[in-house]
Image: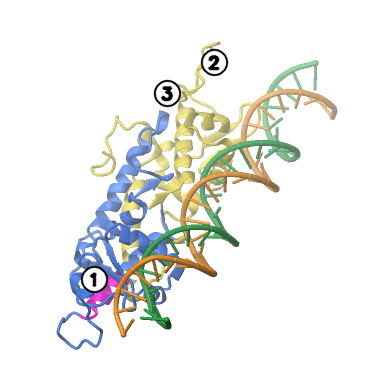
Chain colours: A blue, B yellow, C orange, D green
Amino acid sequence: MYVSARSDYAIRAMLAIAAGTRAHPTPGGPGDVPTTAIGEIAGGAGGPVKAATLATAQEIPLSFLHGILHDLRRAGLLLSYRGVDGGYLLARPAAQISVGDVLRALSGSLTTVRGLPTEAAAYHGVATELGNVWLAVHSAIEEVVDRTSLADLLAPHLHAPEPGAVH
Amino acid sequence: MYVSARSDYAIRAMLAIAAGTRAHPTPGGPGDVPTTAIGEIAGGAGGPVKAATLATAQEIPLSFLHGILHDLRRAGLLLSYRGVDGGYLLARPAAQISVGDVLRALSGSLTTVRGLPTEAAAYHGVATELGNVWLAVHSAIEEVVDRTSLADLLAPHLHAPEPGAVH
DNA sequence: CACTCTTCCTATCAAACAAGTAGGAATACT
DNA sequence: AGTATTCCTACTTGTTTGATAGGAAGAGTG
């Protein structure tokens, strides 16, 4: 089982964006950051986060990050804005985006076997039951990544995750 | 999450070897030798299974299978014999070899993130808790593949697996 | 022992994909 | 107009996957 660099980078980038937008929680508070109409449209309190900021903060190759952010935007998880104060913003609140959502946004399917989704693999002969093993693995992974949201990872001490997930 | 072709082929090859050692065709059947089916009927004691037989039975590229069998032999899961009646044999009974054993024999670690084992990945900043997610995924996968043996997959109807494993 | 046959083993090479790089568009704000 | 940013496209590198060829080791036979 192999988690690609793309997937790892994608989640770290989403976490950094979520933390950046959360860094200014009070809409009318001490905000020297230029609050534009863009930020209000997105429903968040902070401003957009630039790709270069994400790259340096999480040590992700900038050029490689571009392609990842493109996929996340096309999947509807991110909003992008160009211009001098542009950047990326979460399309939904961090509590409503799970780790599984991010993983599925990249490769389409959460788990793949030889490039195909686990439910599409066809086995015959003595390996007939092997497909069920991959399906069981798929369900086990899904159980973990779908109940963990980006907000959970940013504030893990406030509410402990369910028993068995992260010990 | 991605299962490589190497891992998939390895388990299918191990299953074919396990089935072949259990069901060797009776030597008294001239002209009636099926070329496709292998180990379909349980019965007498079998002998080593040839690499070419595995390749055709499970549609695995023969040359690629060579490298996989080499790794399995070096990991101590297979015994190899040369000569006219040579082939491969399980080093232990099929009930004592789990799917996880086969997976670990190939890549060393069961789950990897960006090529590194999940426990070796270091995160900082807002992604600090991400490492625990990968560890939880690792445990969930381990739970499934370590309790499923090759014998379970060959005779799944005789004894149902634990609830939640393979359904 | 010499010979031969079958099979495992190894080394080399080509195609496909992921990872990372580079340069130029198009867009939005000042 | 000018600048800063996202966005798009092509390129290089390394790994995985797959194909081909040629030995090296065991088992039987004359």
Query: With respect to residue A66, does A123 lie above or below?
Result: above
Residue drawn 61% across the image and 27% down it: B85
Tell me which secondary structure the magenta stretch mostly adopts: helix
Give the chain letter at badge 3: B
Q: Which residue is mark 3?
A: B40
SS of the residue under disc 2 = loop
**Relative depth, front residue between B135 and A51:** A51
Dot 1 amino acid type: Pro
Q: On the rendered structure, is B160 left or right of D22?
A: left
Residue B120 visible? The answer is no
Q: Is residue B76 left or right of residue A66?
A: right
Per the image, label 3 sits on a secondary structure element best described as loop
Whether residue B10 is visible, yes or no, is yes
Question: Magenta stretch: residue B112 in it?
Answer: no
Left or right, B39 with reference to A145: right
Q: Quadrant of residue A67?
A: bottom left
Q: Is residue A17 magenta?
A: yes
Query: Which amino acid, by three-letter code, is at mark 2?
Result: Pro
Where residue A106 sits: x, y (%)? 35, 56
Percent from the top left, x then y, of residue B72?
A: 53, 44
Query: Is the residue B77 above or below the residue D2 in the image?
Result: above
The quadrant holding residue B136 is bottom left
Residue that carries the numbered disc 2 in the rendered image: B27
Between the C-alphas of marks 2 and 1, the distance is: 65 Å
Span shown in magenta: A15-24
Tag on residue A16? none
